Image (spheres, helix red, strand yellow):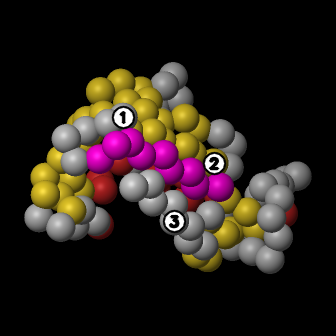
């Protein structure tokens, strides 16, 4: 059975800082009990992860997945193929200024939005 979920949170930080935190995938086990181990297999030219080998534990079941990341200016998408425990996963994080739906944009560092919604 396919599951589709959506959540919206507000983070008091510029989009670049949020994406930098999301790009630190190897730190995920320090802030999420689901992640047991993350190893980056390879990276894009800017240093962000392209693929990672991930060990997770959900409801007592341990699973191993290869996650592939795609990065944009104010978004990240990652996909995990079929594993022993799941059909597949597709996750999208899209950053938007609080109270709006367009992407976080700034014309200069001083006009950067400080609070962004993450969808």
Identify the image quadrant of the N terminus.
bottom left
First-in-chain label (1 vs 3): 3
Residue 87 counted in the magenta span: yes
Q: Could you say whether the residue bearing mark 3 is in a helix, strand or loop?
A: loop
Which class describes the residues within 10 Å of circle 2: few (<14), some (14-19), or many (20+)? many
Q: Are marks 2 and 1 in contact (CB under 8 Å)?
A: no
Quick check: marks 3 and 2 in contact, CB under 8 Å?
A: no
Question: What residue would you read off at disc 2?
Answer: 75
Name which residue lies at 55% across and 43% down: 77
Q: Are marks 1 and 3 in contact (CB under 8 Å)?
A: no
N-terminal of the two: label 2 or label 1? 2
Numbered badge on residue 81: 1
Q: Which mark is residue 5?
A: 3
Task: From the viewer's perspective, tell me whether residue 34 is left or right of residue 62.
Answer: right
Could you classify mark 1 by the number of other residues whose Cα lies within 10 Å: few (under 14), some (14-19), or many (20 or more)? few
**Disc 3 crowd, CA 10 A, few/some/many (<14, 14-19, 20+):** few
Please state which of residues 65 and 9 is positioned toward the viewer in this rendering: 65
Q: Give percent across and percent down for residue 34.
A: 24, 62
**Residue visible at 51% across and 60% down?**
4
Percent of width and height locating residue 22: 46, 53
**Number of marks in the rendered image:** 3
Residue 20 lies, with reference to residue 52, above or below; the image says below
Counting residues from the start of the chain, the first of labels 3 and 2 encountered is 3
Q: Is residue 2 left or right of residue 109?
A: left
Q: Position of residue 81 (x, y in %)?
A: 36, 34
Res. 51 image quadrant: top left
């Amino acid at each position: 059975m396919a599951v589709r979920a959506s959540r919206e949170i507000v983070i008091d930080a510029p989009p670049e800082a949020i994406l930098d935190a999301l790009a630190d995938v190897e730190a995920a086990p320090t802030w999420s009990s689901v992640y047991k181990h993350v190893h980056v297999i390879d990276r894009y030219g800017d240093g962000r992860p392209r693929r990672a080998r991930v060990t997770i534990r959900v409801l007592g079941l341990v699973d191993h997945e290869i996650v592939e990341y795609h990065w944009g200016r104010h978004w990240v998408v990652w996909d995990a193929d079929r594993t022993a425990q799941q059909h597949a996963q597709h996750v999208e994080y899209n950053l938007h200024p609080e109270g709006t739906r367009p992407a976080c944009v700034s014309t200069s560092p001083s006009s950067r939005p400080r609070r962004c919604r993450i969808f």
